[in-house]
Amino acid sequence: MKKLILLSIIVLIISSCKEKAKEFKGIEIEEEVLAEQKPEWVMLFDGTSLDNWRGYLKDEMYDEWTIEDGAMVFTPSEEGGKNIITKKAYTNFELSLEWKISEGGNSGIFWSVYEDQKFKEAYQTGPEIQVLDNERHPDALANPKFHQAGALYDMVQPEQDVCNQAGEWNLCEISINHKTNEGSVTLNGVKIVEFPLHGEKWDAMVENSKFKGWEGFGKHQTGHIGLQDHSDKVWFKNIKIKEL
């Protein structure tokens, strides 16, 4: 009888161990699935190729955009309007890049750019995060500081000025998530701007800006990322994106 009881206990222990093993195996499989689903960073510019970019309303890149020492460089010419965009369109993402601006310079980073011949410039549809020499450009002196580096141009001012001086690199991280209706800008490790992306609050910001009444401005959740020709020399590098 004792042997029978002992045998029953051993069987129960073995069975329990098998169930635990199944549970652990299930956890491992779930972790593998989550790892596969985790979004990865994709390089849009790695310092060697402009293949992910083209001119706005064009099939090729403008000659004014070149590569020097691992950086994408815009050198202005007499004719303006040489904005560039990503070949791919994006909706929800985190964008990370480094920029530096020439003395007294001005440029910008667009998102949700919608291409149509009736919109001659990328800024007619795509909201802009400002790139600026805060020390020398007069736009940085206006109040509210809607035109300061890192601002959601003409709509939301930075909470503080953390911009490095002209000729020095700035790390800019832009988050656009229409699923949560949250956008933000982090400059040199400090989150300085937060804003909604659609709805009544967004509409109110547009209504109180220079973009009031613009037909296509901020209307498209999916669009291209763009870099601006503002007739000043500007550099970009380490451009990468993670879709959300």
Image: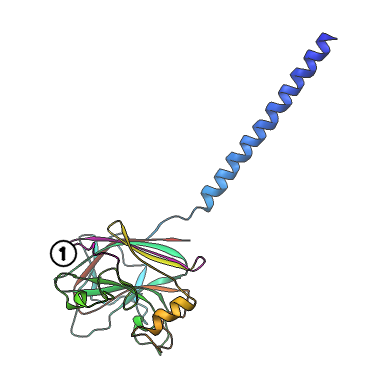
Give above or below for 71 relative to 137: above
Whether residue 161 is in magenta: the answer is: yes
Q: Position of residue 48 (x, y in %)?
A: 28, 61
Residue 44 at least partly seen = no
Give the labeled residue for mark 1: 167
Residue at 63 percent of width and 40 percent of height: 26
* Residue lying at the far top of the rendered structure: 2
Left or right: 146, with 23 as reference point: left
Left/right of residue 64 with respect to residue 206 in the rendered view: left
Q: Residues within 10 Å of mark 1 (few under 14, many from 20)?
A: some
Residue 24 visible in the current orientation: yes
Q: Position of residue 167 (x, y in %)?
A: 15, 64
Secondary structure of the residue carrying tag 1 is loop
Q: Quadrant of residue 117?
A: bottom left
**Front one among 92 and 224:** 92
The quarter of the picture where residue 228 lies is bottom left
- Color scheme of the displayed model: rainbow
Where, quadrant-wise, is the N terminus in this rendering?
top right
Camera-nearest residue between 204 and 217: 204
Q: Is residue 165 left or right of residue 126?
A: left
Residue occupying the point 44% across, 77% down: 202
Task: Look at label 1 and name its amino acid.
Answer: Gly
Whole-percent x and y of residue 125? 40, 81
Q: Start and end of the magenta stretch?
A: 159-180
